[in-house]
Image (cartoon, rainbow, N blue to C red):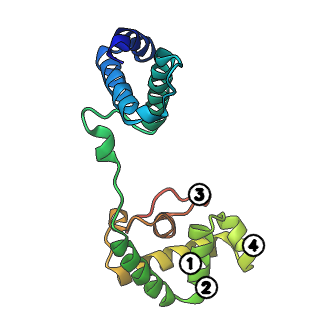
Amino acid sequence: MLAFEPQLRAYAMSLSRSADRSDDLVQETLLRAISKIDTFRPGTNLGAWLTTILRNCYLSDLRRRRHEVEDADGCYSEALRAAPEQEGQLEYKEFCSALREIPFDQREALMLVGAAGLSYEDTATLCRTTTGTIKSRINRARTRLAALLSIDSVSEIGFDSQTRAVMAGGQGNGSKRWSF
């Protein structure tokens, strides 16, 4: 097997284009060949068998590395964060409880605009009222929710996107930002 090492190294270098990586490939090839020597059929081409093992090692490594991201300075891994679920669940329960304390007409308008993403005009049509009335109901509902949840600014609203949409302004409703 060692007699084929220069050929294996040259082939590994042509595949990986890295001296370090080609050394690793050759080493991995020889280790696999030794561990699977019982599968080699005497009288067949040992060089071809070793080259096939090297190629398979290279392709396996490519598949494995396809899902890896180089992050030498750690910026990518720093950006990958998930908020603890327990806190979000507690905030959601608290939000639902506060939402139940708001009068139905205000809650309906707030949910249609904030959570469902309807425009003020569409919500007014659904509720059979004017756009101004819908805007007023939503403002009163948000102010009441903020008081019930002890929220002083939009930045204090949790990570849940639907809760943020309801409290800070839903999609497509024309409101840009809500201030307390």
| Closer to the camera in the image, 121 or 87 | 87
Q: Amino acid at mark 2?
A: Asp
Instruction: Estimate the x, y position of residue 38 in percent, counting from the top left.
Output: 44, 35
Q: Amino acid at mark 4?
A: Thr
Q: What's the CA distance linking mark 4 and mark 1?
A: 14 Å
| Closer to the camera in the image, 5 or 64 | 5
Image quarter where the C terminus lies is: bottom left
Tell me the crowding category of disc 2: few under 14, some 14 to 19, or many 20 or more residues within 10 angstroms, Cα based: few
Going from the N terminus, do you reach mark 4 or mark 1 first? 4
Per the image, the residue denoted by label 2 is 105
Q: Is 30 situated above or below 158?
A: above
Tell me whether circle 4 and circle 1 mark residues in contact (CB < 8 Å): no
Tell me whether circle 1 and circle 2 mark residues in contact (CB < 8 Å): yes
| Closer to the camera in the image, 149 or 19 | 19
Per the image, the residue denoted by label 3 is 174
Instruction: Estimate the x, y position of residue 74 in percent, counting from the top left.
Output: 26, 38
Going from the N terminus, do you reach mark 1 or mark 2 first? 2
Per the image, the residue denoted by label 1 is 137
Q: Secondary structure at mark 3?
A: loop
Q: Secondary structure at mark 1?
A: helix
Which mark is drawn over residue 152?
none
Q: What's the CA distance linking mark 3 and mark 4?
A: 16 Å
Q: Amino acid at mark 3?
A: Gly
Q: Is 32 situated above or below 6?
A: below
Per the image, the residue denoted by label 4 is 125
Instruction: Estimate the x, y position of residue 127 in percent, counting from the top left.
Output: 71, 79
Going from the N terminus, do you reach mark 2 or mark 3 first? 2
Q: What's the CA distance linking mark 4 and mark 2?
A: 14 Å
Q: What's the CA distance linking mark 1 and mark 2?
A: 7 Å
Q: What's the CA distance linking mark 2 and mark 3?
A: 20 Å
Q: Amino acid at mark 1?
A: Arg
